[in-house]
């Protein structure tokens, strides 16, 4: 298979031709959500970004194994190596078993992702289900001399690692520079150096999420789960590791160090990172009052929004920016995306109704060619969308008779427009612009006429309408509250 796909590899800081290790198989690992709160806008961007990658790789004929984890353990407050486990804290506050919290928010995440048109991953491993694999990985790192035990906890020895390999190759940071940013040792720590990070933490007596290990009853460090689970499901070398840019340091940097310390080489060939979102120019944060959950977008129940925005509007808006650019959300910008999406869906519906005639005055293959070229250039979805909009204009010209199209070309155009709009961009027609969505208002209108006939005791017309609707698969049910209908 000849691929012309180029992706920006954060590791080499260049766009590289994508060449899978073992084609046609492609292994993709993406850091998934933490599950101690409702899914918010910050969850939507990586999910949609890597959904596009998955869809595009599949459209190129690759067989993708897409692994996206659920972080349900070891995510401590302030992302530090101590503090309360965030999930356990939520469980304590809500008087729930921690796994109830994890399950509830995992379901909420799944529901939101489905509404956003994000395909389900091939495997969705949970950190709490892979404690044994994580313990084995720690043993391996210890045996290679890149970790040490201290008071029941195990820490990764960054300095020992840095002497042999280089720590900081992904983020470009060097240890000397990290000194300022890193917390200094405050006496509660069992670490030798502030750069070191936990592979295993001994649990304090009140810590409820704990497992036995050779070192103590405790729990794994956050960075460890992704190293353990990616290798378990994708092998010691796999193709793409993705996630949000905020995870680059320390999370992904630590993942690389752990893999190299355990196996002597890196696990992922390409690292891909989506950029962050802002809301009206500001970073999203609970303290800033601009923290908006996806549910609040879908219902409009947030003071900054003023109206509801459908899941497809959110998706379309995300795709209008390149994944490596920052993306600023505002009600006005979303409003623009909403209008654009309606225009696109109307054009798809118009295309379905067009009739061919004469010779084509347009080059149908240009659409496919231009879209592929844009996607091959590091998944440039904004160019794909602007190309589709050029074709919205063409479709309207075809409709007005300003251009003409042959029967074969029309069929091909329908196929290409649908593939790019629905299969690759993953959009859905949710605004009723499609012809099929005319059914409900039409049935309501016919029922109104039937109601008038009944009021005039015109039973023949009333029955005729009922029978004719039944013949096209619409069944009526007369009740006290009026007439209900359903499709068979
Ligand atoms: Zn991760």
Image: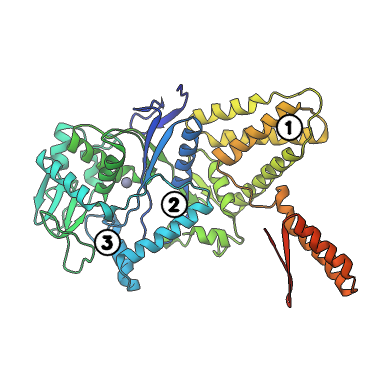
In the rendered view, does 32 fall on the left or right side of 56?
A: left
Q: Please identify the quadrant where the C terminus is shown.
A: bottom right
Q: Is residue 113 left or right of residue 264?
A: right
Q: Secondary structure at mark 3?
A: loop
Q: Is residue 474 left or right of residue 294?
A: right
Name which quarter of the figure residue 391 lies in. Answer: top right
Of the residues under marks 2 and 1, which one precedes in the sequence? Answer: 2
Relative depth, front residue between 289 and 437: 437
Residue denoted by label 1: 394
Spatial CA distance of label 1 from label 3 is: 56 Å
Question: Badges 3 and 2: C-beta atoms under 8 Å apart?
Answer: no
The alpha-carbon separation of the residues under discs 2 and 1 comes to: 36 Å
Image x and y of residue 466, in percent: 79, 63
Q: How would you rate the neighbour count of disc 2 (Cα within 10 Å): few for under 14, some for 14-19, many for 20 or more?
A: some
Residue 463 vertical placement versus 151 (above, below): below
- For label 3, the crowd category at 10 Å Cα-Cα, with few meaning under 14, some 14 to 19 and many 20 or more, is many
The residue where tag 2 is placed is 43
SS category of the residue bearing label 2? helix
x and y percentages locating residue 194 in the rendered image = 18, 49
**Is residue 171 among the parts visible in the rendering?**
no
For the residues marked 3 and 2, what is the alpha-carbon distance in whole angstroms? Answer: 20 Å
> Which of these two is toward me, 30 or 182?
30
Ligand 1 within 8 Å, label 3 CB: no
The residue at the point 51 percent across, 38 percent down is: 322
| Type of colouring | rainbow
Badge 3 is on which residue? 85
Quarter occupied by the N terminus: top left
Q: Secondary structure at mark 1?
A: helix
Q: Is residue 153 left or right of residue 182?
A: left
Where residue 455 appears, as percent x and y from the top left, is: 87, 74
Q: Decide: is 172 above or below 328.
A: above
Q: Earlier in the sequence, mark 3 or mark 2?
A: 2
């Amino acid at each position: 298979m000849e691929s012309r796909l180029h992706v920006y590899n954060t590791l080499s800081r260049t766009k590289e031709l994508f060449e899978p290790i073992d084609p046609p198989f492609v292994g993709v690992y993406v850091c998934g959500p933490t599950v101690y709160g409702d899914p918010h806008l910050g969850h939507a961007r990586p999910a949609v970004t890597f959904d596009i990658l998955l869809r595009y790789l599949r459209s190129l004929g690759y067989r993708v194994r897409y692994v996206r984890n659920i972080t349900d353990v070891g995510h401590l407050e302030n992302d530090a190596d101590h503090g309360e486990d965030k999930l356990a804290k939520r469980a304590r506050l809500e008087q729930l078993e921690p796994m109830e919290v994890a399950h509830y928010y995992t379901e909420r995440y799944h529901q939101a992702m489905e509404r956003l048109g994000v395909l389900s991953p091939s495997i969705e491993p949970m950190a709490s289900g892979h404690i044994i694999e994580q313990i084995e990985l720690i043993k391996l790192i210890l045996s290679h001399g890149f970790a040490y035990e201290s008071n029941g906890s195990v820490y990764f020895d960054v300095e020992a690692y840095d002497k042999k390999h280089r720590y900081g190759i992904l983020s470009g940071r060097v240890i000397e520079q990290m000194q300022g940013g890193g917390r200094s040792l405050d006496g509660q720590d069992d670490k030798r150096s502030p750069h070191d990070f936990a592979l295993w933490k001994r649990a304090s007596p009140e810590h409820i999420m704990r497992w036995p290990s050779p070192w103590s009853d405790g729990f794994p460090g956050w960075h460890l789960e992704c190293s353990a689970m990616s290798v378990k499901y994708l092998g010691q070398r796999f193709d793409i590791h993705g996630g949000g840019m905020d995870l680059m340091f320390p999370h992904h940097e630590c993942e690389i160090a752990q893999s190299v310390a355990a196996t002597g080489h890196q696990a992922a060939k390409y690292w891909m990172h989506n950029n962050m979102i802002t809301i009206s120019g500001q970073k999203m944060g609970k303290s800033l009052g601009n923290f908006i959950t996806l549910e609040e977008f879908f219902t409009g129940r947030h003071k900054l929004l003023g109206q509801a925005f459908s899941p497809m509007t959110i998706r379309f808006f995300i795709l209008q920016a390149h994944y490596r650019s920052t993306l600023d959300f505002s009600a006005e910008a979303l409003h623009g995306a909403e209008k654009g999406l309606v225009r696109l869906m109307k054009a798809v519906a118009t295309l379905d109704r067009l009739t061919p005639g004469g010779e084509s005055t347009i080059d149908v293959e240009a659409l496919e060619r231009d879209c592929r070229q844009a996607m091959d250039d590091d998944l440039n979805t904004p160019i794909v969308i602007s190309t589709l909009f050029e074709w919205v204009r063409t479709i309207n010209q075809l409709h007005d008779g300003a251009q003409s199209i042959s029967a074969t070309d029309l069929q091909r155009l329908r196929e290409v427009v649908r593939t790019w709009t629905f299969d690759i961009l993953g959009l859905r027609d949710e605004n009723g612009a499609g012809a099929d969505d005319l059914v409900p208002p039409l049935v309501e209108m016919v029922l109104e006429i039937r109601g008038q006939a009944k009021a005039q005791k015109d039973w023949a017309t009333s029955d005729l309408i009922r029978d004719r609707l039944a013949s096209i698969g619409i069944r009526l049910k007369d009740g006290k509250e009026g007439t209900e209908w359903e499709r068979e």
